[in-house]
Image: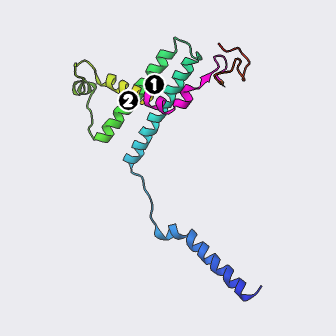
Amino acid sequence: MDLGSILLILSVLVVVVGFVLQPVRERKSVSVSQEEHKLSALLAERERILDALMELDFDHDLEKIPEEVYPLQRASLLDRGAEIIRQLDEFQTGDRVVGEDSIEEGIKDSRGKATAPDIENDSLEAMIAARKKVRKDVDEAKYCHNCGEPIEPDDQFCAGCGSALN
């Protein structure tokens, strides 16, 4: 090796080491506050609940869930979703609600009959409907009633299980 090659290798090594150590030299740390962490967790939980509701509805449409179990699971998910939305509203507006009575008094529709949980359930239903509309291509696809495999409109038999399609 000649002296030029050694100097070239050393100069490349210095540049690489400098590039790798640049974040350490700047000492900029990105810290996440407790509020940002809580907001992120609430948003993730809301998305998880929406996905679970969509899957539950889909499984119910395919008759994979017994009729007596479906309403209970759906109500449980809607209640949890309403609680998450309530927490998000409190977090984003900064208002802390003392009790359920203040929610019912503070939020009513024009007839004065709807309570906060009803409104929150409606907004949760609206979010579900919006998500279903976004995933229109998936919703428009047809599925086998027996195994759940996607089928084409002109198929007479399921490619997954071979059952006749009606």
Q: Amino acid at mark 2?
A: Glu
Q: Nearer the viewer, residue 34 or 125?
A: 125
Q: Is residue 164 above or below residue 34?
A: above
Give the residue displayed 43% in from the left and 39% down from the top. Answer: 43
For residue 49, say whether it is visible. Answer: no
Instruction: Name which quarter of the figure residue 8 lies in.
Output: bottom right
Q: Amino acid at mark 1?
A: Leu
Q: On the image, numbered disc 1 is attached to which residue?
A: 77
Can residue 124 be seen?
yes
Image quarter hosting the C terminus: top right
Question: Closest to the observer: 139 or 71?
Answer: 139
Confirm whether the magenta stretch covers residue 66.
Answer: no
Pointers 1 and 2 in contact (CB under 8 A)? no
> Farthest residue toward the right?
1
Separation (CA) of disc 1 from disc 2: 10 Å
Where is residue 97 drawn, in percent x and y?
A: 27, 33
